[in-house]
Image (cartoon, grey):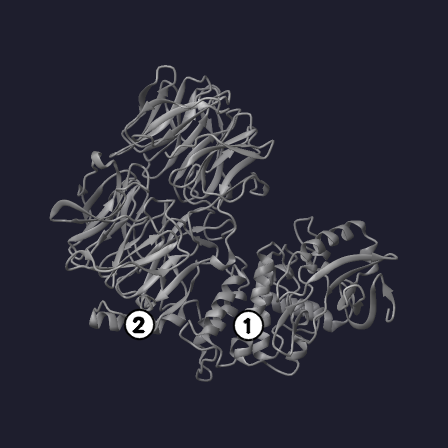
Amino acid sequence: MLGKRLAHYEITGSIGKGGMGEVYRARDSKLGRDVAIKVLPVEMSGDPERLARFEREARTLATLQHPNIASVYGFESVDNVRFLVMELVDGEDLSQHLQRGPLPVDEVVDLGVQLAEGLAAAHAVGVTHRDLKPANIKVSPEGKLKILDFGLARINMDEQGSGTDLQHSPTLTGMTQAGVILGTAAYMSPEQARGRRADHRADIWAYGVVLFEMLTGRRLFEGETVSDTLAGVLRAEVPWDQLPHDTAPTLRRIITRCLDRDASRRLQSIAEARIALEDLKAGRTGESAVQPVAKGDSRWRRERLLWMFAALVLAAVVVTMAFRRTDVPAQPLVQSTLMPPAGWDFAPGSPFAVSPDGSQIAYVAVARPGNESAAAGSNAIWICDLALPEPRRLADTDRDGFPFWSPDGRWLGFFANGKLNKIEAKGGPVIPLCDATDGRGATWNAAGIILFQRAWSEALMKVSASGGTAEPLTTLEKERFDVAHRWPHFLPDGKHFLFYLVSTTNANSEFSGIYLGSLDSKELRFLRKTESRAIYARGYLLYRAGSTLMAHPFDVSKLQFTGDPIPLSADVPGGAVSWGGAEFGTSEAGVLAHLLGAGAASTVMQWRDRDGKVLKILSDPATQTEPRLSHDGTRIAVAVGHDAGDIWIYDLGRGMRTRFTGDPADERTPVWSPDDSRLAFVSSRGDKGEIYVGLASGQSEPKLLFTAGEPVELTDWSNDGRLIFFNRVNPKGSDIWTLDVEKAAAARLLSGNWFEGARLSPDGKWLAFTSYESGKGEIYVQAFPAAGGRWIVSSDAVPGRAGHPVWRADGRELFYQRGSAIAAVPVSGDGGFSSGAPKVLFGISVTAVSADYAVSADGLRILTNELPPADPSKIGARLILNWPRALTAH
């Protein structure tokens, strides 16, 4: 090939040969630049199907531009010779570097950051390497890293079946040289070695192997044959004692997480490694890249995520407890990223709870699909002890839980199964304290009093920390249109408390904000308008403003602000899920944790099949809730916007959306009439609980049909067009009502318990709804209109509240949401009601247990309204030690 021309490319030299073909250096005469040309093997060029897949992949790779990835310029064909045109990367590959021995730890950290940046950029757009190894990584004399052959590995794999045949790995195909074969096998993930389908976590495994080899200068997995090498990948112990003794704990931790043979427990995002190494490189972890350790010290083998904080936390605790000062402490400001347990995500809307001494952080996590230790969508409370290697699962919860600490840090309180509970932080039985059907926040003082909100639209209650009957503490005021008092927080004296008041079902109301109360007085004092709850610590009230966490100086002796608010941290999520909520926590010890991800939660509507596979994305990310599918399946009505939201209609056939409502009020929970000609919805105009009906065509103004005077949510419209079903929230809970459309008269249908989400079967004979009769949310069915028997149809095989039932159009199947999972149960109403065994279909990423799904008439497709894929730069939570130091520059 030397001296030959392929189109306007003149071959000037040979670079090498691999499983994907021979690589040559060439001169592009048109653009006057040197390029690399990879000529594809004849067997690939002669296979139309493989060639078509290769072309599709090449087009994808051509769009992937990153300074740490060798670019693909084009795919060409000349005289039946097919070749890729790629960026020419000078310098040695990493395998050549390692032949001379291990690299310095500082250099490994720098190259590790660059390698993770390249992988993260590709993973973010769905491209995986699957053949990452030192020979595919080049390092320039200036230390710039480039990944070669990115994404090409998957082209040669059989992705049509349920598994991937190992012999089709690109560098194994047609290769007989033992060194090449072993070189590839040594970097395969365990799932690849077993011939199973691999995803981006295979790259993360290989990343860990490469880091290990850069530090040691020797092959991690090696054998005389391919089988021996793969056996080592699957079973051999990692020789951790070979790592240099000056390797930083953070670096050891990353490698340990990458080399977990269980892919569900492995590091789930390469961006986690990038962030941790960047923090290490910048000195933000409180350690240097090089950490001197006594030779033979095996304790580093157990290094886990937050070892780097233990000494700093303990130092901060000692100083804090000794001086109790409100001025800026002398300890350094340290920031890092806190990740959820493997197979779990932090639960949106649920705040972090930092223990009084700052040594532990409690939070709620939701199980991801494929989690082997918990059903998808189930919730659990976890505790991260900053002085221990791993977080631990403390208790399961059917909702967000909203954990809070006792003043001595011994107990953790939380909401679950219709109760306010407590459990010892070290573990033990769950102890119910009192009823709390849908609590939103609680606080505990040294006198053993707990303040809490018992239900969604109530004022505050108080109860003894040993349990008993809860007593009202505050009162909702009609003049102020109070909707709820929530998120209480005791001030240091244990007598005064803060709470967030939600007014007029609209967080933008002039009355909504932070209030001050006292156990000794009924008087409530408005402090300031905010978008979230407030926590007092270290002389400041912390609250959210937009996507920024603010610190406002506050004198607890005078109970007043003493200065202007100061920005503390950015990228703080909004409280769209739980009005007045904010996903952060802190304590007097100066430890702060908050979820990453700015603004109100945006979601994407999409079709999934019953296995959870995404079939079609229907909308761009937007703040939208409660999508309702028309009966003919051609349109979606959905509430768009957080505060002053409107109803919009998506026309699925034309791919267009139109605004249905457009006034300053907040419109929610649309439902379609049986013939899809009208829409009913709830509006906050003038007062609470106004139900309007209008033509779906928008040709006339919607008309007010009924005013409830209390918060309501519409759930269904009967097939005969006569009744609209709705939840009506009251101080004692939630009841199910019906509204006669012709008479504009409402009647209570179910009360005395927490009832919600009524949906009438297509034949009008059976009513499905959620009730807490069993102590937690379950789906029930009873006869309609005359109530007969009542059957529970959901299963507690999946922890969490069951809610939002939806009938299939023929009435033979009932869908519902359990936690963040969609489940279905076969039902029959012939000659009496009966139901089969529920089945969990798949888990979805939602902002709350809300009516954010719908079902096609045949039940084969599920419309979901989910959070879009996470921004790799904003995953996890931000952990800040000695956060008052961040305020000194203002």
- Between 432 and 146, the one lying in front of the other is 146
Which amino acid, mark 1? Answer: Val
- Between 82 and 461, the one lying in front of the other is 82
Callout count: 2
Q: Is residue 50 visible?
A: yes
Q: Which residue is mark 2?
A: 314
Secondary structure, mark 1, is: loop
Residue 523: quarter of image: top left
- Between 760 and 321, the one lying in front of the other is 321
Residue 603 coordinates in the image, percent (x, y): 48, 44
The answer to whether 454 is drawn above or below residue 71 in the figure is above
Horizontal arrangement in the rendering, residue 354 relative to residue 372 (left or right): left
Secondary structure, mark 2, is: helix
Which amino acid, mark 2? Answer: Leu
Distance of label 2 from label 1 (alpha carbons): 32 Å
For marks 2 and 1, give the one nearer the viewer.
Answer: 2
